[in-house]
Image (cartoon, rainbow, N blue to C red):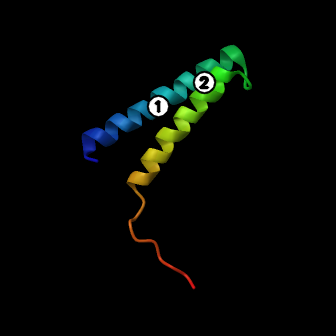
Amino acid sequence: MNKDETLALIQQMEHARQHLHDLYAEYGFGHACVLEQSILLDELINQYNRMFQTKKQPHYV
């Protein structure tokens, strides 16, 4: 990913986080839409983290 794509992903993450906060404030923790938004945010965070993982992981014996 280039710098613009990284910035766009960070902006998506922030928007998803804010939306999750708003949904939680309105519906509470256990509502389906809150859980769905939480999953969406998790997926964005995982995508962001994968961008910075090294391709070669050390193998310990």
Please tell me which residue is depicted at 46% across the width and 26% down the height of the picture: 15
Mark closer to the chain start, 1 or 2: 1
Q: Position of residue 17 (x, y in %)?
A: 53, 30
Look at the numbered disc 1 and give the secondary structure of its residue: helix
* Residue 6 found in image quarter: top left
- The kind of residue tagged 1 is Glu
Q: Is residue 22 left or right of residue 4?
A: right
Q: Left or right: where does residue 6 sit relative to residue 13?
A: left
Check disc 2 and give the amino acid type. Answer: His
Furthest residue to the top? 26
Q: Which mark is residue 21?
A: 2
Is 40 positioned to the left or the right of 30 in the image? Answer: left
Location of residue 21 (image quadrant): top right
Depth order, front residue of 18/1: 1
Q: Position of residue 35 (x, y in %)?
A: 65, 28
Q: Looking at the image, is 55 positioned above or below residue 14?
A: below
> Residue at the location (57% across, 85% down)?
61
Report x, y in % for residue 27.
70, 16
Q: Residue at label 1?
A: 14
Residue density around tag 2, few if under 14, some if 14–19, many if 20 or more, within 10 Å: some
Q: Residue at x 39, y 32 (%)?
A: 11
Whole-percent x, y for residue 34 in the image: 64, 24
For disc 1, the neighbor class at 10 Å (few under 14, some 14 to 19, many from 20) is some
Say above or below: 59 vs 53: below
Dot 2 falls on a residue whose secondary structure is helix
Which residue occupies 45% across, 72% down?
Answer: 57
State the CA–CA distance, disc 1 to disc 2: 11 Å
Q: Quadrant of residue 8?
A: top left
